[in-house]
Amino acid sequence: MRLSILVPLFLTVAASVPRAMADPAAEITSFSLFKEVDMKKLAKGEVLSASSATMRFARGLAVETLFILPMPLAKANDAQQKWDGTRHSELKIYQHVDLPRHPSAQDFQKIATATHNRSVDKFAAATEKLNPERPELQMSAAEAKNASSPGKFEAGGKGISPGVAAFWSGLLHTRASAFASGGLGGQPAYLTRSGAIRPADDAAALLRERGAIHKQFSSLASTMTGGGGGAPFYELFDVEGRAAVSLGATFSRTAGESIQSGTVQYYSSDGFLVMLTFMQMWPVQIDGKAATLVWRSDMISSSQLGELHGIERSGSSVAMRKEIQKNIAAMVKDISSQR
């Protein structure tokens, strides 16, 4: 899920679609970038996407998507929560590990068994050679200092050594524990070239940029950033040829006849600083059969984005949109086969 131009969308409701379907469409247009919802395209399995102009928040970027899951709401919600992206090699998600709400250090030890490939080798090498003054991987000043202590890692070798695994297991455990007890506010600041960046500040900036979405998901957003509860996890995935680790938690609630869910990824060693994903799902009918209409928004903050302007920034937006569409297409294909 690591992730333009707003594509014009036209509201076209087929005769076979009941009038009740207009309600979700109207709700979507009230808070999202989608001002019209093309049910014909969605019913055919297309994933529609949209993004807005550059944010005032220089490190921010957001993409919204719409798609249909051909099954009832409850089943679609359950299938999305259980979907495993590691089965798709093209997504380059090497590990996804669900965690208990209050994890121990042992819950992160699977990182030592990570797939051996060039991406993981580069991640291990970057850890071993980390400069505490200008860390190549994203972490706090204290974490960088800890990584650079003498004798911390074994010299040479390929893959994730015991020392590298122990370092990342400890870092992830400490951050996950801090989130469980204090939410985003308990996360230490990243050490970056432009100074210290706190995950809580970037999450707040993203939500300010998308005020209508924040209002739509106000209760859920508060829970997501407050810490505790939810379904925590960590991932090992590829970012432009080098592996990275991230921490996150997923939350959900009912909202009338729909279901809302939100995922906050509050730490990543590369690729992004914070990622917020909001989804809302409505029961609909497609050709007389129960289906689920899904709206999704992915918001990220990234140090690299803050340095891009003009065409380069537009290119990043397009790349993010394509990456998200690829992830969703893989998920929809898997879930649809479960009917």
Image (cartoon, rainbow, N blue to C red):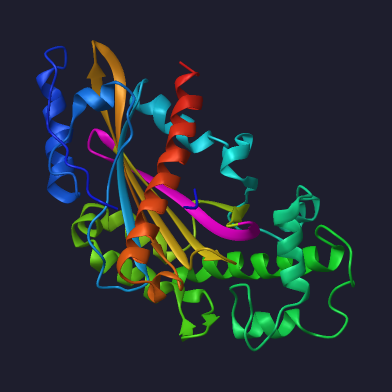
Q: Position of residue 275 (x, y in %)?
A: 43, 60
Q: Is residue 16 left or right of residue 339?
A: left
Which residues, given as a range, are shown in magenta? 241-258
189 to 13, vertically: above or below = below
Q: Is residue 107 visible?
A: no
Q: Which residue is depicted at the point 60% across and 69% down?
A: 175
- Using the image, determine if residue 83 lies above or below residue 274: above
In the rendered image of this protein, does residue 185 appear above or below residue 320? below
* Count of marks, rendered view: 0
Q: Is residue 123 magenta?
A: no
- Pick whichever, 334 or 10, lies toward us: 10
Position of residue 113 in the picture relative to residue 19 (left or right):
right
Residue 260, position as x, y percentages in the image: 32, 43
* Identity of the residue drawn at 59% across and 64% down: 176
Where residue 230 appears, x then y in whole percent? 48, 51
- Determine the residue positioned at 65% across, 58% down: 243
> Dividing the picture into quarters, in which one does residue 105 lie?
bottom right
Q: Residue furthest front?
A: 311
Q: Is residue 228 left or right of residue 167?
A: left
Q: Main SS type for the magenta part?
A: strand
| Up-down relation of residue 98 to residue 46 (above or below) | below
Which part of the image, by quadrant, shows the C terminus? Answer: top left
Locate residue 211: give its quadrant.
Answer: bottom left
Residue 46 coordinates in the image, percent (x, y): 32, 29
Q: Is residue 262 left or right of residue 256?
A: right
Q: Nearer the viewer, residue 48 or 23?
A: 48
Instruction: Say whether residue 54 is visible.
Output: yes
